[in-house]
Image (tube, rainbow, N blue to C red):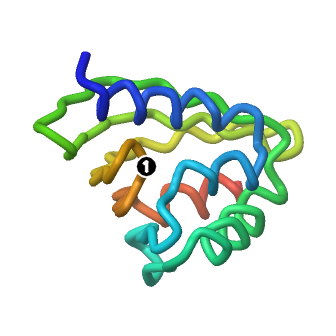
Amino acid sequence: MSDAAQAVREFIDAWPRLDPDELAGWFTEDGVYHNMPSGPVQGRETIRGFIAGFIRPWAETRWEVVSLVADGDTVIAERIDRIRVGEKWIELPCCGVFHLRDGRIALWRDYFDLPTYTRALAG
């Protein structure tokens, strides 16, 4: 497994700890996180705040990697994110495209269907 692929696997494996500081620490200082249904956020501290905000209601999360491919410092990870909010579990198919620089995430674009998530929360 390439160093970039290993770094992305470790980043994905960190999500169940739900620690915004740890997760933001995977990004370069000028990193960009573009959660595609929203606008991009840039900078490690801004990313930390963004992550802290959207995981606030999560009680637990588990991310299953369906497939992961790497080409140099670019990694694509197809996932099923399982998120528990209260007693409700949500399954969200996602695909993340990561561009790494010096072992850190310089750009992460995450693609998923927002209505799948919001309908599951409401239902």
Q: Please determine whether, in this image, residue 5 is positioned above or below residue 112.
A: above
Pick out the residue farthest to the bottom.
39
Picture residue at 51% right of the left edge, 57% below the top: 27
- Does residue 121 appear left or right of residue 33 in this picture? right
Q: Quadrant of the C terminus?
A: bottom right
Total residue callouts: 1
The residue carrying pointer 1 sits among few (fewer than 14), some (14 to 19) or many (20 or more) residues within 10 Å by Cα, namely many
Please name whichever residue, 93 or 49, is drawn nearer the observer in this view of the structure. Answer: 49
Q: Please determine whether, in this image, residue 51 is positioned above or below residue 77.
A: below
Query: Label 1: which residue?
Result: 104
| SS class, disc 1 | strand
- Which quadrant would residue 17 be assigned to in this image? top right
Picture residue at 85% right of the left edge, 41% below the top: 59
Q: Please determine whether, in this image, residue 74 is positioned above or below residue 40.
A: above
Q: Please determine whether, in this image, residue 12 is positioned above or below residue 51.
A: above
Q: In which quarter of the image is the N terminus?
A: top left
Pick out the residue farthest to the top.
1
Residue 83, position as x, y percentages in the image: 67, 40
The answer to whether residue 29 shows anywhere in this view is: yes
The answer to whether residue 122 shows anywhere in this view is: no
The residue under label 1 is which amino acid type?
A: Arg
- Does residue 19 appear left or right of residue 82 in this picture? right
- Does residue 99 appear left or right of residue 20 in this picture? left
Residue 119, position as x, y percentages in the image: 59, 60
Residue 62, position as x, y percentages in the image: 63, 28
